[in-house]
Image (cartoon, grey):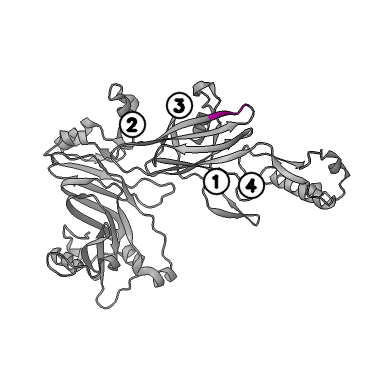
Amino acid sequence: MKKIVALVLALMMVLSLGVSALALTEIKLDQVEVTEDGTKLIKFVDTVEFIGADKVLYTNGPHGGVAYFVLKTTGLKDVKATYSNDAVKAEIIDYDPEKMEFVDGADWAVVRKDGKAIDEYLAASTTLDWSKCVESGKGNYDWCKYVAKTLNKEFKTTQFVVKTTSEIKVLKLTVAANYSASFTEGSVKVSALRVADKKTVYTEMKFVNDITIFAYEYVKSAAENDYALELFDVGYSDYETYLAGYKTPDTAQRRGSRVISTTAFRAIEGKDITVNVYPTPKENDERVAKSADVTIYNVAAGQKGVNFEYYEKEVKEATSTALAVDGENRKVEFGFYGDQVVKSKFTVNFDLDWTYFELREFFGKKVEEQDIVTYYILKDGKVLKEVKVDYMTVDYNDTVKLSIDGENTTLGQYAIAVKVPAENKGEENPNTGAESVMGVVAAVAVVSVAAAAAVSLKK
């Protein structure tokens, strides 16, 4: 995929007024320092990938991130990057071989500041150890640096310097995540002044963070025949159908449906609809795929599009030291990225792929005389309910499941905790004057999980 992007960008040579374009070559860059031969270097790893052709590139997934491209700028000056909006931001970074790993296109040479040839000095040198002149991971930069330093010392001068023979800069793109019900787009323009003829050269590219909508007929069929839509099924590109409609729908088909559109909701007003959702798969994820299902009852008139993109935050293994220090502040986090309001009543059933034993171990809770652990269920950072689990009666190996009801609200972002968040403490319930946590507890039955109540943490 990366090779495709590099090729696309390298071929962007058609510009208005016959002005030549800048050539772009994709590199990887993750601004994390690593130690290599005792030197801290910035490694090059992207966090967002692109697919596409021509002068439009699509993000490969909704989560956004950064991507970096080499700008070959020999013979150019005043290199600038501008962008149309916050959907994708751009900036120019100076390439620094002292801080960054070698990238293709960088080349170096030893020269004298006064312009004199250095061949005679190389021939006359008695201290150059050519066994040390081996190209490193940064091409010939280290070789040149060694030669310049050695010649300056031997001939008692500061004239010998390392100079790039292929000037480069780095273009950094920051793409915003898109969890809305429609595509987002932004354009980036890189321009520079060509020294030879003092003409402005530039290249321009559009970046689209697309979403895939469930096919209209698929949504209608699911509602009428009482079966669930599957997240990631084949759907339609929102961007492509925006451009050309459904005249040639095959060209707009994409795998990865995440959104029921406003139009599709209008077609199923008054009916129920269920969507099975799964967290976006991650490479080398060894855990069993966790899931949830959302059922919207009696779809309300005027319901706008909803994005069902679901997440479960990666949890690191707890060490005994970490649990001793911070066990009660840990959270199991999961939910929906989108902030669209569902007007009708709805239920979300979560299968968290945790056993009761794993949950208790995660928080470092010891089973004492009463064998009861209290868990708080949070929605959007606020306590939604309190659940007491009796570990004398619950089966340790049972899978933890959770059922949440809502109406005229978002699908929500959830967490399980064993400690009430500070922002929830002491808040008064405007209706009763009691603290809000106690108000929630009074409104929701506090039951043993083993009782498998429909509104609580259950088997």
Q: Which mark is residue 44?
A: 1
Which mark's residue is nearer the viewer, 1 or 4?
4
* Sequence-first disc among 3 and 2: 3
Asked if 314 appears above or below 16 in the picture, the reply is: below
Amino acid type, mark 2? Tyr
Q: Which mark is residue 97?
A: 4
* Sequence-first disc among 1 and 2: 1
Asked if 198 appears above or below 410 in the picture, the reply is: above
* Sequence-first disc among 3 and 4: 3
Which residue position holds label 3? Answer: 54
Within 10 Å of disc 2 (Cα), the crowding (few <14, some 14-19, many 20+) is many
Q: Which mark is residue 239?
A: 2
**Range of magenta residues:** 197-201
Amino acid type, mark 4? Pro
Asked if 176 appears above or below 13 in the picture, the reply is: below
Who's the residue at 20% across and 67% down the image?
437
* Sequence-first disc among 1 and 4: 1
Who's the residue at 31% across and 54% down the image?
334
Q: Work out how far the residue at label 1 is from the one at label 3, CA to CA, in angstroms.
A: 25 Å
